[in-house]
């Protein structure tokens, strides 16, 4: 059964086929292309993430706004346009109508991607790090957390950056009933760095276990996402002692320069990259690819069950 898709969506042919046959699909975000990484790394990364999903036997569906439609699955030329765009909007839940009305290109955040993926029946999504509660302002809480509370899908990430207030971010997720799964770890991965001391809500060690867990969560009637957190590959990890001073400096500069709202995350990422001499970006690229591969495995595992039921 393939539910009807609202007409504002444009699905790539391979996404349509995967839906028809019930084969594995993985949603990918595009803010990382339009706002998260510089050129030319952004385009290379977008292709690498798609390839990592394909290698597992799943179909990638990168989501973005182009030509007045929400695209699910992008052509190579679409990826190129997004990667080169200077005036693309960052699309969280409040921003879809703005981009459509103003005929702008848009890179979808974790929240934006989850929304569009859910509307088009995709249940697995890979990203780098989720947004969270910022340290700079008590009310700057990413819409990603609201989306995780309300949209039932598996989101694979490398935790969140320690630029954020991580204890507050985890408290928020707990309040909202979002399971935080440590993939092969008992503590919450901190993006560029190895997992620190904050506990996850459950540790799971295989894609099959993750699928069983998520199905049980939803079978109970829960409506939230299941957040799967995978540590950055050890070889690419940056020690916390190296990252934290850079993040603290970036955070101070943001306050001094009055940078807030949607601009804050890109500003912090850019400064941390400069202050670590580019090492943070290497870690970022490695973890993104690694998360796409795990999401591919999870989606394949999930589709085996769907196909058995059909
Ligand atoms: N973390 C990163 N790179 C990114 C983002 C987060 O390391 O590009 C993006 C994601 O798309 C995430 C968004 O959903 O930033 C969160 O932004 P905000 O805090 O404004 O909600
Ligand atoms: Mn914010």
Image: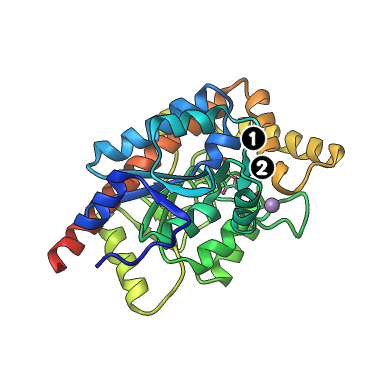
Query: Looking at the image, do the residues carrying marks 1 and 2 touch, with CB atoms under 8 Å apart?
Result: yes
Q: Residues within 10 Å of mark 1 (few under 14, many from 20)?
A: many
Give the residue pinned by disc 2: 265
- Any atom of ligand 1 within 8 Å of the CB at mark 1? yes
- Comparing 71 with 309, the one in front is 71
Looking at the rendered structure, which numbered label has been put on residue 269? 1
- Any atom of ligand 1 within 8 Å of the CB at mark 2? yes
Which quarter of the image is occupied by the C terminus?
A: bottom left
The residue at the point 58 percent across, 60 percent down is: 145
Which quarter of the image is occupied by the N terminus?
A: bottom left
The residue at the point 25 percent across, 58 percent down is: 302
- Comparing 31 with 2, the one in front is 2
Model colouring: rainbow
Q: In terms of image quadrants, where is residue 13?
A: top left
Q: Is residue 206 visible?
A: no
Residue 242, percent from left and from top: 62, 30
Residue 143, percent from left and from top: 62, 58
**Direction from residue 182 to residue 38 in the image, left or right:** right
- Tell how many labels: 2
Please, which residue is most extreme toward the bottom here? 221
Q: Is residue 193 above or below residue 219?
A: above
Q: CA distance from mark 1 to mark 2?
A: 6 Å
Looking at the rendered structure, which numbered label has been put on residue 287? none
Dot 1 falls on a residue whose secondary structure is helix
Residue 293, percent from left and from top: 32, 40
Residue 225, percent from left and from top: 45, 64
The residue at the point 55 percent across, 68 percent down is: 174
**Direction from residue 210 to residue 281 in the image, left or right:** right
- Comparing 248 with 285, the one in front is 285
Dot 2 falls on a residue whose secondary structure is helix
**Direction from residue 249 to residue 225 in the image, left or right:** left
């Amino acid at each position: 059964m393939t539910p009807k898709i609202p007409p504002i969506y444009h699905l790539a042919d391979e996404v349509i086929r995967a839906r028809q046959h019930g084969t594995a699909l993985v949603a990918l975000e595009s803010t990382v292309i339009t706002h998260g990484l510089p050129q030319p790394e952004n385009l290379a990364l977008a292709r690498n993430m798609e390839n990592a999903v394909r290698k597992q036997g799943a179909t990638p569906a990168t989501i973005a706004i182009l030509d007045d439609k929400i695209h699910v699955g992008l052509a190579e030329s679409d990826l190129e346009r997004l990667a080169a765009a200077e005036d693309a909007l960052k699309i969280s839940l409040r921003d879809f109508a703005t981009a459509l009305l103003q005929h702008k290109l848009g890179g979808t955040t974790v929240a934006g991607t989850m929304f569009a993926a859910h509307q088009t029946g995709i249940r697995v999504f890979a990203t780098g790090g989720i947004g969270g509660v910022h340290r700079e302002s008590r009310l700057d809480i990413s819409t990603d957390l609201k989306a995780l509370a309300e949209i039932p899908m598996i989101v694979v990430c490398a935790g969140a950056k320690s630029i954020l207030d991580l204890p507050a971010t985890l408290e928020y997720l707990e309040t909202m009933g979002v399971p935080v799964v440590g993939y092969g770890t008992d503590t919450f991965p901190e993006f560029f760095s190895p997992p620190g001391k904050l506990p996850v809500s459950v540790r799971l060690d295989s894609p099959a276990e993750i699928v069983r867990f998520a199905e049980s969560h939803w079978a109970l009637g829960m409506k939230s996402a299941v957040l799967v957190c995978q540590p950055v590959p050890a070889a690419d990890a940056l020690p916390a002692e190296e990252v934290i001073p850079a993040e603290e400096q970036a955070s101070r500069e943001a306050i001094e320069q009055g940078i807030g709202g949607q601009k804050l995350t890109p500003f912090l990422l850019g400064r941390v990259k400069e202050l670590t001499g580019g090492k943070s970006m290497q870690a970022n690229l490695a973890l993104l690819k690694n998360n796409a591969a795990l999401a591919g495995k999870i989606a394949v595992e999930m589709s085996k069950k769907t196909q058995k039921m059909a």
